[in-house]
Image (cartoon, rainbow, N blue to C red):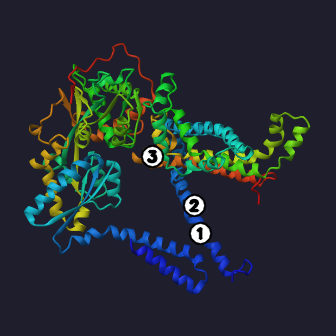
Amino acid sequence: MSGRPDAADAGSREGANDRGPAGRTKPVALAAALACATLMLPVAGCAPVDANQGRDVDVLTIGAYSVVREALHQGLLPAFAAKWKAKTGRVVRFEESYNASGAQSRAIASGFDADIAILSLESDVDNLVKAGLVDKTWKDGPGKGMVTRSLVVIGVRPGNPKKIAVWDDLAKPDVSVLYPDPKTSGGARWNINAIYGAGMLREGKDKPDPAAAVDLLRRVQARVVNMDSSGRQSMATFERGTGDAVVTYENELLLQDKLKGEAVPYVIPASTLQIESPAAIVEDSVKRHGNRKVAEAFLEYMRSDEGQDLLVDWGFRPLDPTRDRRPLPLKLFSMADLGGWPKIKKSVYDPGGVWDKLFTTKAPKTNDAPKRLGTGGRAG
Amino acid sequence: MRTEPSISPGGLAIRGGVLSYLGVMVVLPLVALAWGACNLGPAAFWKELSNPFAWHALKLTIITALAMVVVNIITGTATAWVLVRYPFPGRGAMNALIDLPFAVPTVVTGLMLVALYGPTSTLGAILGAHGWGVIYQSPGIVLALLFVTYPFVIRSVQPVLYEMEDAEEEAAATLGASPWTTFRRVTLPTLWPAIVTGAGLSFSRALGEFGSVIMVAGNRPLETKTSPMYIFGEIESGNRHGAMVVSAVLLACSLGVLLALNLLQRRPGGDHGR
């Protein structure tokens, strides 16, 4: 910061000597100073590289999706730092960046030198694999590359005045629903997959039923009033009073309780989707920063019992179901049950897929009224 | 040096510098966008443009912008008229307040509108009970556009009104013309280039409005998703070309409006002619 005024001063003094009134040259000097400052920005960004060498400080840069911010910043990072200090005597300093998962993935792919990527969707890590930054074998280790889990649930108003218990209730004509736009939010895709999957794997059917899935999704989408660009914004809209129900991650709702001591009531639909979020080491960055050890130790810590318990404390579900203390839905399905991310991306979200067709084609007329999906919902 | 006529090397350097600056700051990005939109050929361009989502977003953007322009022409001209012709207490303050919408971050504009007309606000609840949804519906988009373009028509009409002699109007009045006839036959012909300028500027500005619209539109595909929101969504979900095509169309519209305004101002009677 101190460089800028100096440069400006020097510029105007110089100008005063060879060009007369200082007033005329000042803008030039200012522009020069600004240009210098702009040029110096990337240099400043490289500083952590040096900080690693020859001192007892490790620097770990974390590029994460926004939903894990509080759990990391207030929970796991300090806990890991204490552990690392006790084990190695070294101080670990974190550089943290939180952004929407897709945006974060693109930032890392285009040069943001995070050592660890913690993202919402597997496909966002796959993009880093494609960019040659993450090892192809990232899914082979413990947890299959995942670090945390959650459920897709429905946040409701206190007392649940609209009596929402299952996905079909979101399609009732007097209910207004919020979830983010799947075009801009990875989280929205989890939410929409949950509704789509619940329709697909309806009880009493022995085969997955794509028509029922599209039908349920279409009826719920008809009740959506506003699609924000991220899950966080969607939550904010809900808190400002819009909507009877918000489809979101369970941990996002539990976080409100943790941060404000004010729980957002929610229901776990009888049949819902298990969210699994991955983390991976960005090979390119750890190679340059020479901090592979601490990066590996941190990922290991995230998956350890202690790390998992901390995540549970922040509202997530543990990788190991036996450590789960919260109620589970009657039926919990995963992306694997729906055929995996690549298949869902292609059939639902790619141009001309299910999502587009919701809006471009009219609902088919059917005789059988939609059946309700049981009544296993529980208030949280 | 400075007193010499134009051909000095310093003068040339300044002109060259300014022109290159314009090139780098404005022309190059425009060319890059046009190239990005067109390099796959007209068929690919048309395919992206005729996509129902892109097409609807463009239509919605243009229709809401036109609705805004109609309101803006009437209210903006009236506001300028009142400010110039009628002294009243607080006129100075009002004159200062008019530029405020330019200084407000557009996201804040959106937030203010949600607070005022949102479904949970008193006003929003009353309107909603009568079936007039504002926020998360297209009227919300028009309101947001009206707010962010508020000063345009006023600020282009105001100086013309100041310069206008009221002798002609008085003459018309003494010859027995009604106030409305006077306005229509005498005042309006002088004012209209300025009104069209303000309208054109606000239309161009509205085509790209993102920050406030994203807060109030509802963002539902084929219903309330405007072009800037469509562009953002396509970029985020990896359809760069689709985003560029719609951007290029918006840009072409803006450019067309600005060029037309420029031509208009060169005609005799235009007040900014050179």
Q: Which residue is mark 1?
A: B20
- Within-10-Å neighbours for mark 2: few <14, some 14–19, many 20+: few
Quarter of the N terminus of chain B within the rendering: bottom right
Separation of disc 3 and disc 2 at Cα? 21 Å
Tag 3, which chain? B
Tell me which numbered mark, 1 or 2, is placed earlier along the sequence. Answer: 1
- Within-10-Å neighbours for mark 1: few <14, some 14–19, many 20+: few
Direction from residue A112 to residue A85 in the image, left or right: left
Considering the numbered disc 2 on the image, is that residue within a helix, a strand or a loop?
helix
On the image, which quarter does residue A213 sit in?
A: top left
- Please state which of residues A8 and B94 is positioned toward the viewer in this rendering: B94
Rendered image: mark on residue A2: none
Residue B201 image offset from top left, x and y in percent: 64, 48
Q: Amino acid at mark 3?
A: Phe
Q: Could you tell me how many numbered marks the image carries?
A: 3
Tell me which numbered mark, 3 or 2, is placed earlier along the sequence. Answer: 2
Task: Looking at this view, name the residue that lies furthest to the front.
Answer: B89
Tell me which numbered mark, 1 or 3, is placed earlier along the sequence. Answer: 1
Q: Which residue is mark 3?
A: B232
On the image, which quarter does residue B87 sit in?
A: top right
Direction from residue B139 to residue A262 in the image, left or right: left
Q: Amino acid at mark 1?
A: Ser
Q: Amino acid at mark 2?
A: Val
Tag 2, which chain? B
